Image (spheres, rainbow, N blue to C red):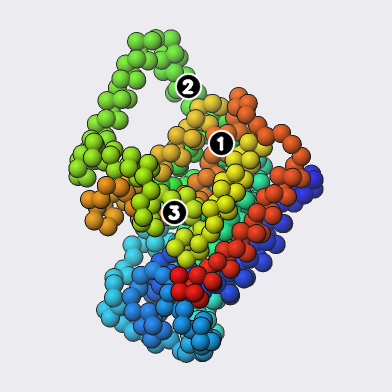
Amino acid sequence: MKNLTKNIHKIYFGIAILFGLIFSIGMPFFNEPDGPYHFVVSSNMVGLTPDISKYGEFTVGSGMANQADSYNNGTRFEKYYLTKIQLTSKSKLPRDFSLSPLSYDFWGHLIPAVGVWMGYHIYPSMGVMITVGRLFSMLFYTIITFFIIKNVKRNKLLFTAVLLSPTVLNQNSSLSYDSLGYILFAGLLSILINALDENKIRVKGLILAIILSILSIVGTKQNIWVLLIIFPIVLFSIKNPLSKYQIKSITKPINLIKQNKKVQIGLLLLSLAIIIKISISLTSKFGGIIHVARRFFMTFIHQYGDNLTTASIWRSWLTSPYAFYNRMPTWSVVAWNVLIILLLLYEVKYVRSKFVSVSAAVLFVLGIIATYYGFLNYGTGTSSFIQGLQGRYFTATLLILGLAVSNKSFRLKVVGSEKYIVGFSFSLIVITNIMLIFNTLITLILGG
């Protein structure tokens, strides 16, 4: 079992490549959310402007329902792989595809764009462009993830499970920008986990963590920005190249706060006042703090019929990247959440600082709240609940919970044979990824 755990990255690589090939070649086109958009954006980035209306896609939005006929009448290969794509001008596209070089939309499509360009020069059809783009993205992200799992010293099983979940493997084998966010955050967190385990960070690790943090700001969604605060928190809790300077600068004020209750009370009241002031300011344009609070409450308490509500988020952060089409059963969602809890509680306790663990848990929650806040205007913006979010936004952020639960003072722990934990993990991974393929195809062929 020691050898199994030690070589878990090799098992990851085998499973990821196997399902990556199946997803890349066998899954319907646009099976990721906003699929047509990702294809057109990736094409535009390498100077190609495809007219996808020639393939029956008259909007550049989301969904794959238009492919059902080609599956049912046996014309899929001829329609998508043999029919050459026609290029058009950007002015004739049904939406604007101008991207800022400082947006996650731009950076997240760089890798898929290279693959799409390669596919076009192999054979200029939409089917070949998408398939080669998927394969290139899958290989790139799988290799990077392989090294992340290999080098992280703790929460190795948690990293492996999350990064082999149907949601992640499907997004890796697509033209989506999500996978860049997954590896940037996982890479940064792996450095911080190793630093916490050793109680120190070296110059090389510090420089790499700074680079990944900067890349995360331009290459990931805003909810991950909130979680980046964990970097300086970890840095100040361990030995680092700046330790002798930080000790001098923070020891005196910290001691003053600890020794004076009036100062503690004053800081608490000041913090509350600042939080209330910021909350009022942030919610004023959305109807005020009471109205926004009510919408948050209804979002998490009541199940609405819309497919982009809290229920679909719960389904899609691990098992169902496109819940409307994937139709994964509830038991698979529950099983994955049970697995994540087991892996969190099974891990060796390595975090010494309670402040780091509490901060990790708080930041995870704040990341969720911040994302919901960003969707207050989605749709009409006046409904009694918040809609539009998808669970894939939070998939990689689950990894930060490892810092919250693996504190040395946290006594709740799963005790048992590692072989059963590992066996359950990989059994669920294989079964649910097979189910994702089957359910997606069946839903499409049967017309939803």
Quarter of the figure with residue 106:
bottom left
Q: Which residue is mark 1?
A: 403
Q: Position of residue 73 (x, y in %)?
A: 51, 87
The answer to whether one can see residue 226 in this image is: no
Q: Position of residue 264 (x, y in %)?
A: 37, 15
Apparent side of residue 286 relative to residue 61 in the rendered image (left or right): left
The kind of residue on which mark 3 rests is Ser
Dot 2 or dot 1: first in sequence order is 2
Apparent side of residue 383 relative to residue 246 in the rendered image (left or right): left
Q: Is residue 2 above or below residue 143?
A: above
Q: Which residue is mark 2?
A: 248
Question: What residue do we see at 32% from left, 25% from top?
Answer: 271
Instruction: Using the numbered discs, state the Cα–Cα distance from disc 1 to disc 3 in whole angstroms.
Output: 26 Å
Question: What residue do we see at 53% from left, 59% from top?
Answer: 328
Q: Is residue 137 above or below residue 318?
A: below
Q: Position of residue 272 (x, y in %)?
A: 31, 25
Q: Position of residue 414 (x, y in %)?
A: 67, 34
Q: Nearer the viewer, residue 70 or 419?
A: 70
Apparent side of residue 38 relative to residue 289 in the rendered image (left or right): right
Q: Nearer the viewer, residue 44 or 2?
A: 2
Residue mark closest to the camera, 2 vs 3: 3
Q: Residues within 10 Å of mark 2 (few under 14, many from 20)?
A: few
The answer to whether one can see residue 84 in this image is: yes
Q: Nearer the viewer, residue 46 or 6?
A: 6
**Label drawn at residue 312:** 3
Q: How many marks?
A: 3
The kind of residue on which mark 2 rests is Lys
Question: What residue do we see at 34% from left, 15% from top?
Answer: 265
Question: Quarter of the image containing the N terminus?
Answer: top right
Dot 2 or dot 3: first in sequence order is 2
